Image (spheres, rainbow, N blue to C red):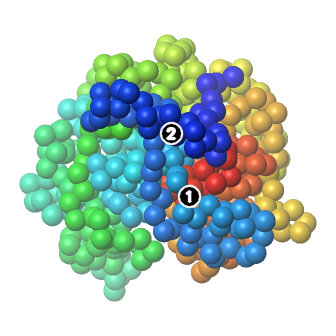
């Protein structure tokens, strides 16, 4: 089996006496100013959102349990994974977004890894998302390099505004000229400025003034200094590979090499990919990292995929295990279903994965609109009929933790998962 994602520390069992012992350590003066270490107990702030969600829940034992934790000291927890940082309120894959995730208790933080024209690794969700996640269209000399320059909408003829700007269109030096913004675009825009103003109305632009973009190596340094674990995702290339002699295996290896160069213990790194061949490559050539490589399961893309029918899963769970895969990561909806009474329960997929010996993580909590407005969308599609208020995020999280047995949950606002993990005592 893989090395467990979750620290065995029971946060709720930390006693007053232990805290006093730590507080009276004669070496405290020597520790001042040092960075926290991996697995070190770190107090964090979860802010008001978890209590807001609890308040929206209907009366239940879970609501009572969660409500009783309001005001408790909260600690960093590996069950809580920062998806692109804390992308609900901060521009994704920016220094500010990562810091928000760390401050709210994420024990693991994600950098999606892609590459520039000069084959340097940077943190972006997609190789070609710069038009929607940065201010590239506001910088003429860079906008002119976009694979598909901005084209305004022509609503009279049913034409939407478009632009496609890739990291591979620009060098690292040019990438550093960009600033991050909240992901979004206005398809009705007639100007580049209007196109960039497309933030979803359930998010905020309050913290998106000048997001600081980072390279993959810079994210490693930041996470290492903060004492959090790291889960880089090798993104699919949007250019033909090899790219100027840079092969897929070169790409997969370079990502790991940057952890090795930074002297990061492989036990603190969970490399991910939707490409099963990338995962197999790490398992075969870098077994210390491959031991906890994460297969982001994209079998749901097949037209006949049914999480309740194992005959529609290819490869099978056992075949994945035989290939050396230890951790699998499907989206939320694949792991849950509704029973005859419309209760959220574990899906057959979830049961089969556990039976095969696979550890499970899942994505992405709080990456939907207002649940009370029926905006759960894609992430909740298997349980839509049971979702009608914001507190249902905790109801789903409880099933994922207790019935499915996931070892970590990606969230766009990690504080929610941090609160749950502390309160329930995972």
Residue 377 screen position, x and y as percent: 60, 68
Q: Is residue 423 visible?
A: yes
Instruction: State the CA–CA distance, disc 2 to disc 1.
Output: 17 Å
Q: Residue at x 41, y 58 (%)?
A: 87
Contact between marks 2 and 1 (CB within 8 A): the answer is no
Q: Which mark is residue 20?
A: 2
Q: Residue at x 55, y 73 (%)?
A: 52
205 relative to 163, above or below: below
Q: Is residue 302 visible?
A: no
Asked which quadrant contains residue 343, the reply is bottom right
Mark 2 Cα within 10 Å, few/some/many (few <14, many 20+)?
few
Q: Residue at x 68, y 73 (%)?
A: 57
Q: Nearer the viewer, residue 266 or 228?
A: 228
Q: Nearer the viewer, residue 210 or 275?
A: 210
Asked which quadrant contains residue 407, the reply is top right
Q: Nearer the viewer, residue 83 or 137?
A: 83
Residue that sits furthest to the left in the current view: 141
Q: Residue at x 42, y 30 (%)?
A: 25
Mark 1 Cα within 10 Å, few/some/many (few <14, many 20+)?
few
Asked which quadrant contains residue 111, the reply is top left
**Element under label 2?**
helix
For disc 1, the marked residue is 72
Query: In what quadrant of the picture does the N terminus appear?
Result: top right
Q: Classify residue 18 as left or right of residue 197.
A: right
137 relative to 317, above or below: below
* Earlier sequence position, callout 2 versus callout 1: 2
Residue 263 screen position, x and y as percent: 34, 19
Residue 72 screen position, x and y as percent: 56, 58
233 relative to 347, above or below: above
Q: Classify residue 341 as left or right of residue 227.
A: right
Residue 376 screen position, x and y as percent: 61, 69
Residue that sits furthest to the bottom in the current view: 156
């Amino acid at each position: 089996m893989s090395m467990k994602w979750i620290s065995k520390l029971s946060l709720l069992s930390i006693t007053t006496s232990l805290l006093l012992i730590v507080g009276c350590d004669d070496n405290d003066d020597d520790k001042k100013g040092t960075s926290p270490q991996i697995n070190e107990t770190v107090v964090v702030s979860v802010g008001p959102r978890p209590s807001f969600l609890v308040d929206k829940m209907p009366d239940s034992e879970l609501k009572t349990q969660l409500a009783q934790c309001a005001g408790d000291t909260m600690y960093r927890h590996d069950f809580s994974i920062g998806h692109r940082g804390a992308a609900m309120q901060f521009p994704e894959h920016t220094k500010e977004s990562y810091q928000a995730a760390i401050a709210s208790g994420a024990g693991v933080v994600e950098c999606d890894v892609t590459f520039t024209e000069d084959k340097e690794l940077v943190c972006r969700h997609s190789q070609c998302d710069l038009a929607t996640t940065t201010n590239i269209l506001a910088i003429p000399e860079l906008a002119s390099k976009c694979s598909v320059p901005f084209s305004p909408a022509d609503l009279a003829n049913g034409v939407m505004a478009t632009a496609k700007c890739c990291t591979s269109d620009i060098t690292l030096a040019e990438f550093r000229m960009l600033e991050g913004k909240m992901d979004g675009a206005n398809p009705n825009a007639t100007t580049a400025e209007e196109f960039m103003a497309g933030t979803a109305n359930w998010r905020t632009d309050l913290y998106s003034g000048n997001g600081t973009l980072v390279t993959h190596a810079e994210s490693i340094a930041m996470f290492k200094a903060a004492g959090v674990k790291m889960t880089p995702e090798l993104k699919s290339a949007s250019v033909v590979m090899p790219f100027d002699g840079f092969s897929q295996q070169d790409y997969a290896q370079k990502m790991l090499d940057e952890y090795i160069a930074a002297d990061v213990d492989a036990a603190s790194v969970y490399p991910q990919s939707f490409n099963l061949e990338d995962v197999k490559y790490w398992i075969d050539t870098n077994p210390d990292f491959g031991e906890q490589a994460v297969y982001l399961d994209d079998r749901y893309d097949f037209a006949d995929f049914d999480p309740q029918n194992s005959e529609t899963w290819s490869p099978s769970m056992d075949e994945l295990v035989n290939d050396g895969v230890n951790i699998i990561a499907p989206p939320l909806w694949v792991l849950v279903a509704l029973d005859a009474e419309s209760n959220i329960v574990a899906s057959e997929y979830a049961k089969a994965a556990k039976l095969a010996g696979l550890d499970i993580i899942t994505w992405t909590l709080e990456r939907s609109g207002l649940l009370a407005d029926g905006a759960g969308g894609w992430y909740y599609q298997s349980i839509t009929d049971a979702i009608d208020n914001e507190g249902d995020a905790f109801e789903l999280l409880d099933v994922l933790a207790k019935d499915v047995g996931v070892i970590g949950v990606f969230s766009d606002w990690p504080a929610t998962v941090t609160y749950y993990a502390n309160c329930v005592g995972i």
